[in-house]
Amino acid sequence: MTQINKDIEKYISDVGTHLFCLKKNKKAVLADMREAICEFTENNEVNSIDDIYKRFGTPEEIAKAYIADTEPKNIKKAVNIRKLIVIAVVIALVMLAVSFAIAIFDSHKQNISYYYNSDIVTDASIP
Protein backbone atom coordinates (compact mmCIF):
# COMPACT_ATOMS: atom_id res chain seq x y z
CA MET A 1 0.00 0.00 0.00
CA THR A 2 1.46 3.33 -1.03
CA GLN A 3 1.76 6.27 1.31
CA ILE A 4 -1.02 8.19 -0.44
CA ASN A 5 -3.36 5.22 0.01
CA LYS A 6 -2.51 5.10 3.72
CA ASP A 7 -3.15 8.82 3.98
CA ILE A 8 -6.50 8.45 2.21
CA GLU A 9 -7.55 5.63 4.56
CA LYS A 10 -6.58 7.78 7.56
CA TYR A 11 -8.52 10.69 6.05
CA ILE A 12 -11.64 8.53 5.68
CA SER A 13 -11.17 7.19 9.21
CA ASP A 14 -10.91 10.76 10.52
CA VAL A 15 -14.17 11.61 8.78
CA GLY A 16 -15.75 8.64 10.55
CA THR A 17 -14.61 9.83 13.97
CA HIS A 18 -16.36 13.16 13.42
CA LEU A 19 -19.64 11.70 12.21
CA PHE A 20 -22.38 11.40 14.82
CA CYS A 21 -24.90 9.11 13.21
CA LEU A 22 -26.12 5.55 13.28
CA LYS A 23 -23.51 2.93 12.44
CA LYS A 24 -25.26 1.84 9.23
CA ASN A 25 -25.46 5.46 8.05
CA LYS A 26 -21.81 6.04 8.92
CA LYS A 27 -20.76 2.99 6.91
CA ALA A 28 -22.76 4.20 3.92
CA VAL A 29 -21.29 7.71 4.11
CA LEU A 30 -17.74 6.38 4.38
CA ALA A 31 -18.30 3.95 1.50
CA ASP A 32 -19.59 6.82 -0.64
CA MET A 33 -16.57 8.92 0.34
CA ARG A 34 -14.18 6.11 -0.49
CA GLU A 35 -15.83 5.69 -3.90
CA ALA A 36 -15.73 9.45 -4.62
CA ILE A 37 -12.07 9.67 -3.61
CA CYS A 38 -11.16 6.64 -5.73
CA GLU A 39 -12.93 8.17 -8.71
CA PHE A 40 -11.14 11.48 -8.08
CA THR A 41 -7.72 9.79 -7.87
CA GLU A 42 -8.36 7.84 -11.08
CA ASN A 43 -9.32 10.94 -13.03
CA ASN A 44 -6.78 13.35 -11.54
CA GLU A 45 -3.15 13.28 -10.61
CA VAL A 46 -2.98 13.08 -6.83
CA ASN A 47 0.49 13.61 -5.40
CA SER A 48 -0.33 14.07 -1.74
CA ILE A 49 -3.18 14.09 0.74
CA ASP A 50 -3.30 17.86 0.34
CA ASP A 51 -4.93 17.33 -3.05
CA ILE A 52 -7.69 15.37 -1.31
CA TYR A 53 -8.10 18.09 1.33
CA LYS A 54 -8.37 20.73 -1.40
CA ARG A 55 -11.00 18.78 -3.29
CA PHE A 56 -13.12 17.40 -0.42
CA GLY A 57 -12.28 19.57 2.60
CA THR A 58 -11.22 18.61 6.09
CA PRO A 59 -12.82 15.66 7.88
CA GLU A 60 -14.54 18.12 10.23
CA GLU A 61 -16.04 20.03 7.31
CA ILE A 62 -17.35 16.85 5.72
CA ALA A 63 -18.91 15.74 9.03
CA LYS A 64 -20.53 19.16 9.53
CA ALA A 65 -21.96 19.06 6.02
CA TYR A 66 -23.38 15.59 6.62
CA ILE A 67 -24.88 16.61 9.95
CA ALA A 68 -26.42 19.69 8.36
CA ASP A 69 -28.17 17.43 5.82
CA THR A 70 -29.27 14.81 8.38
CA GLU A 71 -32.61 14.79 10.12
CA PRO A 72 -32.32 15.84 13.78
CA LYS A 73 -34.12 12.72 15.00
CA ASN A 74 -31.40 10.50 13.46
CA ILE A 75 -28.66 12.50 15.14
CA LYS A 76 -30.54 12.44 18.44
CA LYS A 77 -30.97 8.67 18.17
CA ALA A 78 -27.24 8.18 17.55
CA VAL A 79 -26.33 10.41 20.49
CA ASN A 80 -28.80 8.58 22.75
CA ILE A 81 -27.27 5.25 21.78
CA ARG A 82 -23.81 6.57 22.68
CA LYS A 83 -25.14 7.85 26.01
CA LEU A 84 -26.64 4.45 26.79
CA ILE A 85 -23.36 2.74 26.02
CA VAL A 86 -21.43 5.15 28.25
CA ILE A 87 -23.96 4.72 31.08
CA ALA A 88 -23.79 0.93 30.77
CA VAL A 89 -19.99 0.97 30.92
CA VAL A 90 -20.02 3.27 33.96
CA ILE A 91 -22.54 1.04 35.76
CA ALA A 92 -20.47 -2.05 34.96
CA LEU A 93 -17.32 -0.38 36.30
CA VAL A 94 -19.08 0.70 39.50
CA MET A 95 -20.43 -2.81 40.04
CA LEU A 96 -16.96 -4.24 39.46
CA ALA A 97 -15.44 -1.80 41.94
CA VAL A 98 -18.08 -2.61 44.58
CA SER A 99 -17.56 -6.35 44.07
CA PHE A 100 -13.82 -5.91 44.39
CA ALA A 101 -14.22 -3.85 47.58
CA ILE A 102 -16.52 -6.50 49.11
CA ALA A 103 -14.07 -9.25 48.20
CA ILE A 104 -11.20 -7.36 49.84
CA PHE A 105 -13.29 -6.67 52.95
CA ASP A 106 -14.30 -10.34 53.22
CA SER A 107 -10.75 -11.58 52.83
CA HIS A 108 -9.58 -9.10 55.47
CA LYS A 109 -12.37 -10.17 57.83
CA GLN A 110 -11.41 -13.84 57.43
CA ASN A 111 -7.77 -13.11 58.29
CA ILE A 112 -8.63 -11.48 61.63
CA SER A 113 -8.29 -13.98 64.46
CA TYR A 114 -9.34 -13.57 68.03
CA TYR A 115 -7.18 -15.29 70.62
CA TYR A 116 -7.98 -15.80 74.21
CA ASN A 117 -6.04 -17.36 77.01
CA SER A 118 -7.74 -20.36 78.57
CA ASP A 119 -5.28 -20.56 81.45
CA ILE A 120 -6.85 -17.80 83.44
CA VAL A 121 -5.94 -17.88 87.08
CA THR A 122 -9.05 -17.69 89.20
CA ASP A 123 -7.34 -17.58 92.56
CA ALA A 124 -4.68 -14.98 92.75
CA SER A 125 -3.69 -15.54 96.35
CA ILE A 126 0.00 -15.19 97.02
CA PRO A 127 1.59 -17.95 99.20
Image: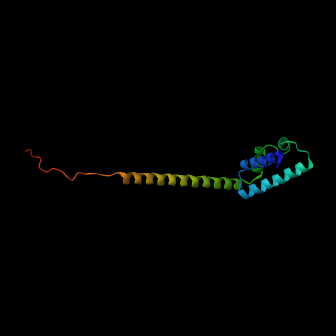
Residue 84: % across, % down: 61, 55
Q: Residue furthest front?
A: 127
Q: Give 96 or 6, whichever is nearer the viewer.
A: 6
- Of residues 119 and 92, the one drawn nearer to the viewer in this rendering: 119
Which residue is painted at 66% across and 52% down in the image? 79
Task: Tell which of 114 and 21 is nearer to you.
Answer: 114
> Residue 27, how many percent across, how many down?
75, 56
Residue at 54 percent across and 55 percent down: it is 92
Q: Residue at x 47, y 53 (%)?
A: 100
| 83 left or right of 12 in image | left
Q: Quadrant of the C terminus?
A: top left
Q: Nearer the viewer, residue 61 or 36?
A: 36
The answer to whether residue 50 is above or below residue 122 is above
Q: Residue furthest left?
A: 127
Count every numbered label the image shows and give the total.
0
Residue 17 placement, left or right of 120: right
Where is residue 72? Give x, y as percent.
71, 53
Q: How is the image coloured?
A: rainbow
Name the residue at 71% across, 57% down: 23
Q: Residue furthest bottom?
A: 24
